Amino acid sequence: MTEAGELLALVRELRARAAEGDLQVGPAGAARPAPPKPEPVEPPGLDALKAQVAACRKCPLGAQRLNPVFGVGSPKAQVMFVGEGPGFQEDRQGEPFVGKAGQLLDDILKAIGLSRQTVYIANMVKCHPMVDPSNPDARGNDRPPAPDEIEACRGYLEEQIRLIRPRFIVTLGNVATKALLREELGITRARGVWRELRIEGLEEPVRLLPTFHPAALLRDPSLKRDVWTDMKNLRTELSRP
Ligand code: URA
């Protein structure tokens, strides 16, 4: 190739790379490396949604709880874990799964190379459902969320799913599985079977895997085997491009 030909080829390559955002080409055509793009901390909208949840009074739980429990983890998570609702500890700390069941969830995540920082963890409802809301300091005061409380809160979880766009959702236990799939199938039959969850506004359905709630494993350790099978299954799917 002649010198002029080589120069022309170089200019074409630089233009192509500039078009791909690899390089910036100055006014005189001189190439310089593009400055690193700032990483968004959260996708736009997640912060605003969190503020909406903090002010929410769509059901009575909003006025009863100590702290809203929005969710925790990476806003770019490939997998989202969904539980039923905050308990005593979560209400105090404003973070999901921080009690005994949460510690077990951390161990489960660790066993498949994940962590609370790399996944996203949320609940069907964002406020602590209490048996006796007049006594938030009582222990043993937790209860599952009622159907109308789940419906009042559903839009927030769906918006989290739209903003985070996880590849996979793992529902933890009966309440979250039935509520998200809008089905009456119990967790013992539902667990371990991949499902598809359609969320309005998302083109593709999200693949959903039901498994047992970590609190159920604390009550009955024999369930750990099935959860381990489900987590290995999840790990395999995560490793696929
Ligand atoms: N159980 C849940 O379902 N969610 C929590 O955040 C804690 C316990």
Image (tube, grey):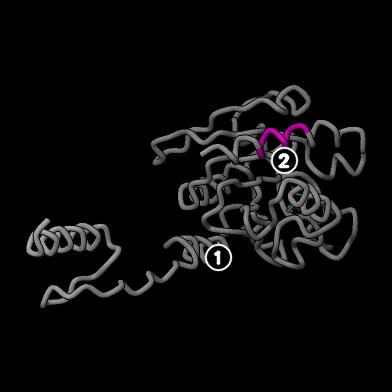
Q: Is residue 21 above or below residue 143?
A: below
Percent position (x, y) of residue 18?
22, 63
Mark 2 is surrounded, within 10 Å at the Cα level, by few (under 14), some (14 to 19) or many (20 or more) other residues, namely many
Instruction: Give the CA distance from mark 1 to mark 2.
Output: 26 Å
- Tell whether circle 2 marks a residue whose Cβ is less than 8 angstroms from ligand 1: yes
Q: Is residue 55 magenta?
A: no
Secondary structure under the numbered disc 2 in the rendered image: strand
Read off the magenta span: 229-235
Secondary structure under the numbered disc 1 in the rendered image: loop
Percent position (x, y) of residue 78?
55, 47
Task: Determine the main secondary structure of the stretch shown in magenta.
Answer: helix
Residue, disc 1: 55
Residue, disc 2: 172
Q: Is residue 207 above or below residue 92?
A: above
Among the 4 quarters of the image, the one containing residue 222: top right
Percent position (x, y) of residue 59?
61, 52
Would you say 43 lies left or right of 209 here?
left
- Residue at 56% across, 54% down: 58
- In this rendered view, identify the residue nearer to me: 130 or 204: 204
Q: Is residue 202 above or below residue 72?
A: above
Among the 4 quarters of the image, the one containing residue 234: top right
- In this rendered view, identify the residue nearer to me: 43 or 173: 43
Q: Quadrant of the N terminus?
A: bottom left
- Under mark 2, the amino acid is Leu
Among the 4 quarters of the image, the one containing residue 204: top left
- Circle 1 or circle 2, nearest the eye: 2
- Under mark 1, the amino acid is Ala
Percent position (x, y) of residue 166?
53, 45
Q: Is residue 28 above or below residue 236?
A: below
- In this rendered view, identify the residue nearer to me: 141 or 83: 83
- Residue at 19% across, 71% down: 25
